């Protein structure tokens, strides 16, 4: 999983990108997208204002459980210092 961030003004915005290289099956790509949007919704109150971000999933994400995806997202947000303390 890769996180790209830019700072802007106003409300924060995020996108989750799951390419067909991750999975040919659209339902599995949409499932991964929904899991990550749900995890983002959980962390939304703690996110800094004015962030524009994109989360790109890698091929190994198909084999991860939802809890593992959420944990990886949390680690990315902590490393990028996107969460307020």
Image (cartoon, helix red, strand yellow):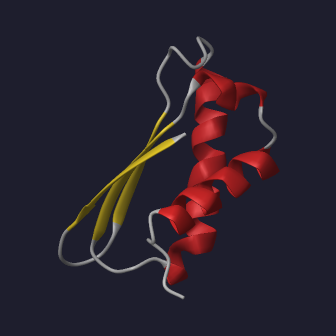
Residue ID at (62%, 60%): 75
Extreme residue toward the front, this view: 79
Extreme residue toward the left, this view: 9
- Answer with the quarter of the image where residue 26 lies: top right
Q: Is residue 68 left or right of residue 51?
A: right
Residue ID at (60%, 55%): 73
| Image location (x, y in percent) of residue 1 | 55, 39
Image height of 57 relative to 16, above or below = above
- Answer with the quarter of the image where residue 48 lies: bottom left
Q: Is residue 8 left or right of residue 59?
A: left
Q: Nearer the viewer, residue 76 or 53?
A: 76
| Image location (x, y in percent) of residue 57 | 53, 34
| Image location (x, y in percent) of residue 17 | 44, 36
Residue ID at (33%, 70%): 12
Image height of 85 relative to 31, above or below = below
Extreme residue toward the bottom, this view: 85
| Image location (x, y in percent) of residue 31 | 66, 36
- Answer with the quarter of the image where residue 49 lies: bottom left
Image height of 49 relative to 6, above or below = below
């Amino acid at each position: 999983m890769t996180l790209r961030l830019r700072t802007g003004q106003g409300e924060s915005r995020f996108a989750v990108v799951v390419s067909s290289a991750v999975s040919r099956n659209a339902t599995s790509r949409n499932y991964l997208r929904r899991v990550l949007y749900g995890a983002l919704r959980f962390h939304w109150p703690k996110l800094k204002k004015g962030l524009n971000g994109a989360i790109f999933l890698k091929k190994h994400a198909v084999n991860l459980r939802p809890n593992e995806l959420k944990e990886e997202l949390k680690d990315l947000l902590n490393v990028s210092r996107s969460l307020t303390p």
